[in-house]
Amino acid sequence: MQDFINAIILGIVEGLTEFLPVSSTGHLILTGDLLGFDGEAKKTFMIVIQLGAVMAVLLLYWKRYMSMLKDMVKLDFKKKKLNVIHMILAMIPALIVYLLFNDFIKSVLFGSGPVLISLVVGGILLIIAARVKRKITAEETDDITYKQALGIGLFQCLALWPGFSRSGSTISGGLLLGTSQKAAADFTFMISVPVMLGATVLDLYDSRDMLTSDDLLLFLIGFIAAFVVAMVAVVTFLNLIKKLRLEWFAIYRFVIAILFYLFVMR
């Protein structure tokens, strides 16, 4: 019974943190440690429930996804418009790194210590991205070039270190590569659906021999909790991340890291 309660709590945490550059995975790991919710299957759980929150993005951007699918079917990539090629370029780097280093990531980086370090390092990246002066060449997502999409994809590799934050790394990358914060945020969440869908499928496949029916039930409970909370939070938080200066999120990350270290780890 306690595991089911933990799954709901973690689903709520995921739904509240997925759309902010504070690292939902990092929060899940730290919360899981506080709840005593650990084990190999729990690491897969933390990846699966992120897909639940991300599905809220699918509903929010469904018209954009449908437009891209129509252009792909027509092989129409000539217009200045976000298309499937942008998405693929942004996904490939993280996919390659995941396939090469997945065992290392889950065995070494899924712990409180590495998460606290990445919260701080990721916060520093947010501050750098916010303060570096650069020429904005992409005000909207349709202005993003293939080169920028690939560059954002390279920054997304940092998010494989739990605590770094997928949105934090990709938005920072977008800003450093010349996109507006709004364009970077929109693009970040557009690519989150195929990225998390792929990560979930791959992780479930890799973990298939160790999962039980009870684990799958926990996954479903956490997935639903994350989806429901994310549906309530998504619009507010997406608007917040497009407008609020990234330094505020960095400060939050520093405070969480310090408090957890002082009062939990010591």
Image (tube, rainbow, N blue to C red):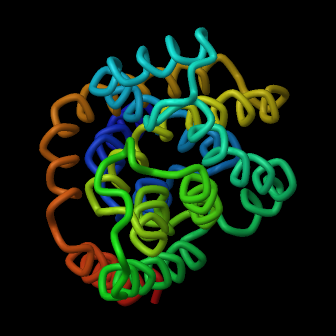
**Residue at the spot x=54%, y=59% of the render?**
148
Above or below — where is 70 with respect to 43?
above
Say whether residue 180 is left or right of residue 237.
right
Quadrant in which the N terminus appears? top left
Residue 236, picture quadrant: top left
Question: x%, y% of residue 169?
Answer: 48, 66
Q: Is residue 153 above or below residue 208?
A: below
Picture quarter containing residue 240?
bottom left
Q: Examine the rendered structure and indicate whether residue 87 appears above or below residue 93.
A: above
Q: Is residue 34 visible?
A: no
Point 56% across, 37% down: residue? 196
Q: Position of residue 233 (x, y in %)?
A: 18, 39
Q: Position of residue 199 (x, y in %)?
A: 65, 38
Q: Nearer the viewer, residue 58 or 207?
A: 58
153 and 140: which is toward the camera: 140
Quadrant for the C terminus in the image: bottom left
Q: Where, by quadrant of the figure, is residue 200 drawn?
A: top right
Q: Residue most toward the front?
A: 78
- Residue 187 at least partly seen: yes
Q: How many marks?
A: 0
Residue at 33%, 76% in the rendered image: 253
Nearer to me, 175 or 210: 175
| Horizontal side of residue 221 vs 43, given as left or right | left
Q: Is residue 176 above or below residue 141?
A: below
The location of residue 25, given as percent across then percent down, is 48, 55
> What residue is drawn where x is 15% and y is 67%?
244
User: As rendered, which of 214 and 185 lies closer to the eye?
Assistant: 185
